[in-house]
Image: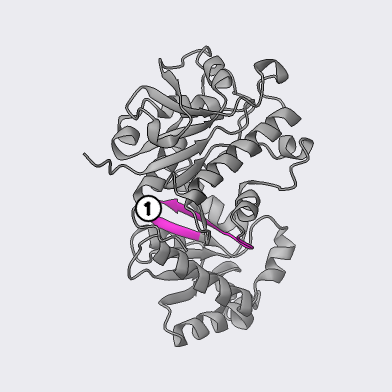
Amino acid sequence: MKENRPLIAVPMGDPAGIGPEIVLRAAMSREVNEKSRFIVVGDAGVLQRALSFPHMPEVRIRVTDRPEKGEYREGVLNVIDLGNIGIGDYEMGSVHAACGRAAYEYIEQSVRMAMEGSVDAVSTTPINKESLHAAHVPYIGHTEIFGALTHTPDPLTIFEVRNTLVFFLTRHVSLRKACDLITRERLVDYVKRSFAVMEQLGLKNATMAVAGLNPHCGEHGLFGDEEVREVAPAVAQLQAEGYPVYGPIGADSVFFQAMEGKYTSVMSLYHDQGHIATKTVDFYRTISITGGMPILRTSVDHGTAFDVAGKGLATSVSMEEAILVAAKYAPFFQRK
């Protein structure tokens, strides 16, 4: 019988963080196993060690050399074992160059499998920026790594929560610089690219609302004129070209309106604007998607949680949701 469940590669993440724990817990999820097949790219020894942490479930670790040879059912964690770190090389909850290097290599292998088509998508676990830096990995985070490995110059960061997509015009820059980057040209470019991503994800008849920057969108220039100078002209140009874009709409209400079904997506103008709106609604089920690449990537939206790593306390809700979102979009994803 043909297997219809999408096949998802999950790089294990930083060995000193909660990545090993959450992938083991995800293996016990009935919904994840019903809707997907996922295989971890990591280190079997690290995963075996994680099974000894308090409160961990009974999971059978099964090493295989190819994704199609996995045994995909509840309670079994299939692993492509890179064997690239020893458990004596690091301490849980700490920054280590060896962990940064290992985490990068898990991502590298996962991307390679997705690019060659042996998996349908990649769902990432947390990595640590300091560990990457210590390992001389020349990227600040996942988005930059995926961009380089897939030869994508400027990938789009997207959040999904409650079936609403949030795109980000600016990401890891200061608030002052973010304001300077809010230009008509940049907004037009990002909105067009965002609609291309939504089409790639199989979303038909998608719409987008553009959030305002200033309180009440500046009240026609009374306190801030970015909406008048840059945002409104960009929206008008896009509408004239046939894009179903609306705004600017005050950031205090636009995310609520989208989650109520009025819009498919929202363009957040700066990092915290969209992060706060989504994570406050549902922190663990806010899932990150990287758009504009030839492969589909989703991710948990939390860090390595060094403060609880190794204690068996980490929840796998976000990991499970990231895999489920990848499985949802994988059948519709159009490779470029």
Task: Give the image quarter of residue 135.
Answer: top right
Measuring from the top left, give residue 203's x and y in whole percent: 35, 63
Residue 165 % position (x, y): 44, 58
Please report the residue visible at 46 percent of the width from the left and 88 percent of the height from the top: 240
Amino acid marked by disc 1? Tyr
Q: Nearer the viewer, residue 197 or 256?
A: 197
The segment highlighted magenta reads 152-166
Q: Is residue 149 above or below residue 47?
A: below
Tell me if residue 164 comes above or below residue 189 in the rendering.
above
Residue found 41% across the figure and 18% down from its top? 59
Few, some or many residues within 10 Å of mark 1 (<14, 14–19, 20+): many
Locate the N terminus and report the quarter of the image it occupies.
top left
Question: On the image, numbered disc 1 is attached to which residue?
Answer: 329
331 left or right of 131 in image: left
Percent of width and height locating residue 185: 62, 79
In the picture, measured across the screen, residue 173 lies left or right of residue 296, that is: right
SS of the residue under disc 1: helix
